[in-house]
DNA sequence: ACCCTTGCAATGGTATGATGATTAGCACTT
DNA sequence: AAGTGCTAATCATCATACCATTGCAAGGGT
């Protein structure tokens, strides 16, 4: 970013003789400073930052600048700003949902097609199956079975939604017991759901077959049969992918 | 909104009779409005939003409020704000790299351990190998070979860096010819590099063996041998993962 | 004629001061 | 004892002013 063309004024050698004094915004500098404190662990979730006016004095800037910095931190999900007597900026940890939302916005603008995103999702969700087979506990399996039961009930009641399918896949990812994986899978479903909803392709029959495959997948997991689990998941994901490509 | 029944306060049914009049901040409302315009496609990448002062009039708010809204949009990577005569807020055309950076930032700030991120990366990079075997063109393979040659030269010159290894993996991902996948792989390397650099574990010997494995991997790809390619990549990633876990 | 400098205008960046809205805690009244 | 109203702390917004940066065009020197 800070290329600073540094057009040679007279000779060719003095490219960096006059270095910029402060290239960035002041508010951005404050944001960076707070982020650094977070990374260093000197600010932990639940901590309260000083009040706006106090921060003004500390940094020697105006309230507008401090507020802009807080806005950026808030938008990034790093702090939660509360008003009132004991209000202020409280440190939080960004949830996967917030991250997914930000990702969805960017993916919206990006030149990526739903097809490409779907393929990436296929790769990832298929790749975690061995981990799931290896690590799923009895509780995980029981929770998944319960989820499928709920979905089948919803299906018969006629109010099965795509987000239920997303819940299943997220819960499967949780069985890896790796939050990073769970978060990524969850993040994928945001943009994906949107592209599906936009196309208005909510076939109920789909849901029927989908939940059946979900159930079969759980059985394979319970039997610790990685091959079968992957085969089921592969086909299951492929059907969704086909649907996306048709609606594209 | 027109209350049909003036339920007296105190009964159990009037939970939502008096709904809040304005839940959100004004600046947040502006952000949402712009986001909606983006989703609807009425604002496209490259478009320029009206100037701050003009937006003030349009929305009927002060400039501070508009600026805070722009800050949020900028933090989300949705607009790019330029100063100067023909400056203003421009809708960004997100490159894969920019999206990857955003994702890396988010992963970075979330409470994930390097180990967890590394495992997610292993899953993903291993999962794309079949796609690479299937789709890599002669150009891809030639580019990869050239990359390895450069790395070996750098190795002998003593200035081999971890980012070179990252370049290799990114180039491999590019061979899937799916920008979404390429972007994700790229985004993984941000936090990973940081965690490795923090631990100061830049073993040159590592680089030697690493590039050898890179070369062997390319050979497997060229031979369209998915099994062998995956085996090599699996071991290669595992060694990196071990290093992370040791430095943790 | 060409190039460089300079001034101008548009625009974002920051500062300052003031006012309103919201909330927790406390004192006061019933 | 319970409810009520006050008060202080804090964020939310506004209005105005001034500075910095940038693109463009006019002007002057070669």
Image (cartoon, coloured by chain):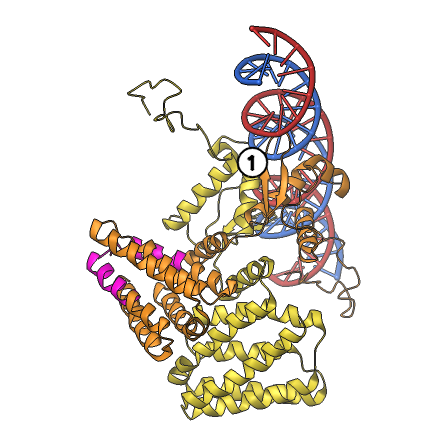
Chain colours: A orange, B yellow, C red, D blue
Q: Is residue B218 above or below residue A34?
A: below
Within the image, what quadrant is residue A241 found in? bottom left
Residue at the spot x=21%, y=49% of the render? A157
Quick one: A53 or B16, which is closer to the camera? B16
Question: Mark 1: which secondary structure?
Answer: helix
Q: Is residue A54 above or below residue C3?
A: above
Where the C terminus of chain A falls, by quadrant?
Answer: bottom left
Where the N terminus of chain A falls, by quadrant?
Answer: bottom right
Residue at the spot x=49%, y=89% of the render? B218
> Where does residue B141 sit, x and y in percent of width and height?
47, 87
Tell me if A203 is positioned left or right of A85 in this view.
Answer: left
Quick one: B40 or B161, which is closer to the camera? B161
> Where does residue B29 sit, x and y in percent of width and height?
47, 38
Tell me if A47 is positioned left or right of B36 in this view.
Answer: right
| Magenta residue span | A189-214
Residue at the spot x=58%, y=52% of the render? A93
| Visible residue check, residue A231 | yes
Mark 1 neighbour class, 10 Å CA radius: few under 14, some 14 to 19, many 20 or more: many
Residue B116 sits inside the magenta stretch = no
Chain for disc number 1: B
- Main SS type for the magenta part? helix
> Where does residue B235 sit, x and y in percent of width and height?
54, 85
Within the image, what quadrant is residue A189 found in? bottom left
Residue A207 sits inside the magenta stretch = yes
Q: Which residue is mark 1?
A: B65
């Amino acid at each position: 970013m800070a290329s600073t063309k540094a057009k040679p004024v007279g000779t060719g050698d003095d490219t960096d003789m006059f270095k910029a004094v402060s290239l960035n915004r002041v508010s951005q500098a404050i944001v960076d400073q707070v982020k650094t404190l977070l990374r260093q662990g000197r600010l932990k979730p639940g901590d309260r930052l000083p009040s706006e006016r106090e921060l003004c004095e500390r940094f020697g800037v105006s309230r507008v600048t401090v507020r802009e910095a807080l806005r950026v931190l808030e938008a990034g999900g790093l702090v939660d700003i509360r008003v009132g007597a004991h209000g202020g900026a409280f440190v939080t940890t960004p949830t996967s949902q917030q991250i997914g939302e930000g990702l969805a916005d960017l993916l919206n603008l990006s030149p990526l097609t739903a097809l490409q995103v779907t393929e990436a999702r296929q790769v990832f969700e298929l790749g975690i199956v061995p981990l799931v087979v290896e690590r799923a506990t009895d509780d995980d399996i029981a929770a998944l079975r319960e989820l499928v039961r709920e979905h089948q009930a919803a299906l018969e009641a006629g109010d099965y939604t795509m987000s239920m399918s997303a819940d299943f896949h997220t819960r499967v990812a949780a069985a890896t017991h790796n939050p990073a994986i769970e978060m990524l899978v969850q993040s994928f479903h945001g943009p994906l759901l949107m592209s599906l909803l936009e196309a208005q392709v909510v076939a109920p029959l789909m849901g029927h077959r989908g939940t059946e495959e979900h159930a079969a997948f759980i059985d394979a997991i319970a039997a610790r049969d990685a091959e079968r689990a992957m085969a089921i998941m592969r086909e299951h994901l492929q059907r969704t992918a086909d649907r996306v490509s048709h609606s594209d």
